[in-house]
Amino acid sequence: MDNGKEKYGYTIDELFEMAVNDSSWEADKDLREVYALMLKNQLMNLT
Amino acid sequence: MILREGEKAPERTINEKYIENCKNLYDSLNFVEPKKVPIGIEVGNWPVIYGGKLYKDVIGKPEETAAAYYKFLDEVKIDYFWGGCGVGTNIKALNALGSEAYYISHDGNTIGHNQVGSFIMPEEDYPQLIEDPFGYIKNVLIRQRVPSMRKDKAAAYEDLVEALKFVKIQERANKLISNKVDENGTVSLCFSGPRFSVPLDTIFDTVRGFKNTLIDLRRRPELVKEATDKIFSIQNAALQAQLPNFIGKRDELHCGNTVYHSACFLNDKQFDEYFFSYFKEGYMPFFNEGVHCYLKGEGKFLHTLDRYRELPKGAMVIMLEEDDPFEVYKAVGDWVTIAAGMKVDLLKYGSKQDCIDYAKKCIDTFAPGGGFIFMTDRPLLGANDAKFENVVATFEFVNDYGSKQSCKEVI
């Protein structure tokens, strides 16, 4: 399945991974992981 | 609020009240008459209204959101929430990503849902969905539904970080609210067990929508079944991986949850094929370890409840919506725990005495011998969903009377 890497230059997983590794918006890595998971789940469950 | 895939329940601060509430829930779910009937309620943002605010005015302001919630938590005594308590859908985060899937309704408080405007999977994409259901949702549906995910990488990332900042803000509000919930000793019942995701609901809620899924069940049932089989195989592997956490813990309160979204629109054959067979296969190992499952029922579904006699007695806790709880009690009240006791319609349109009389009748009928927990039939969401004085009077009454139901002749 096309994951959009070619068309958009990134996959959605890669974008979230960047955010998890970016301390500019939240210093605590555990919290970054939790918040990223919550948002990704919200997008995965959009109806 | 519910926990979705991979999300962990927040750590709780346990006090004596919490332990007492857990004991009463444990007894009720195991058909032992508790010292007090566990008292629950389902609320969305309604407590903000009770606190004298509108959600549109406190959204994005954690301290103000929590302060508005506190008045409700201080004044209405609740032993348990079936899920969590706090603000769920993060509208601002979704807006930061260009999505308008959710919005604050005209009452300034209720979170509305815009499925009509959402991108729906075209029917010719079923083979892609069957090949990789969650890859399809991520790589096709999210790209279509979330405008920022179609921007170039730098712009998309900027929007994502902005959205995550809103997640952080909202979770600050929820943390403050859950601190108060902990202080009150209120139990988030279904954080204590695994969630069963209904495969057909993934298609119904997320992929094809309400109307198309019901059409597909008639015109292309073989594709729907292939898709639900694949979704189940993936989700069930994740579910079974949690089983070791519950082995040998029968003396603890463990209750997961599931929901009827599509179920009440299915005929008997479809219900067995698309709900019950998956549920039984997936959850039976947990039932065998003494874990319960809370079903948040939606719609009318009395005709489905006889199946639960195939599961161990006490395995299920069933929250009713449109069915008459007295009819349900006659049908399965000896086998499943009933979560009922107050109609939100009555809280809105009835008098205080109407509410008290109905609650009393429910407690008198359902509580003896356990197998009953008090719950509203719908969540309180909007500004006009209930009269404040009815809520206060009802919960004062049930907290008092539920402690004495086993010797009700003295009342």
Image (cartoon, coloured by chain):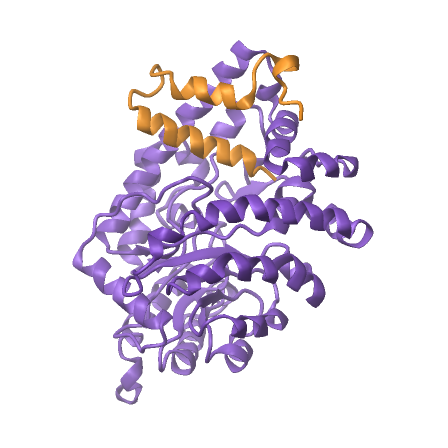
Q: Is residue B1 shown to the viewer in this render?
A: no
Viewer-nearest residue: B34 or B30? B30
Q: Is residue B115 above or below residue B20?
A: above
Estimate the x, y position of residue B257 in percent, counting from the top left: 46, 56
- The chain painted orange is A
Estimate the x, y position of residue B320 in percent, counting from the top left: 52, 66
Look at 31% across and 78% down and name the residue there: B33
Work out which residue is located at the far bottom of the displayed protein and give it. B409
Q: Is residue B406 above or below residue B320?
A: below
Q: Colour of chain B?
A: purple
Look at 69% across and 48% down and name the residue there: B210
Look at 53% across and 46% down and name the residue there: B235
Estimate the x, y position of residue B40 in percent, counting from the top left: 37, 62
Picture quadrant where residue B6 is located = top left
Look at 26% across and 88% down and name the residue there: B410
Task: Give the quadrant of the C terminus of chain B.
Answer: bottom left
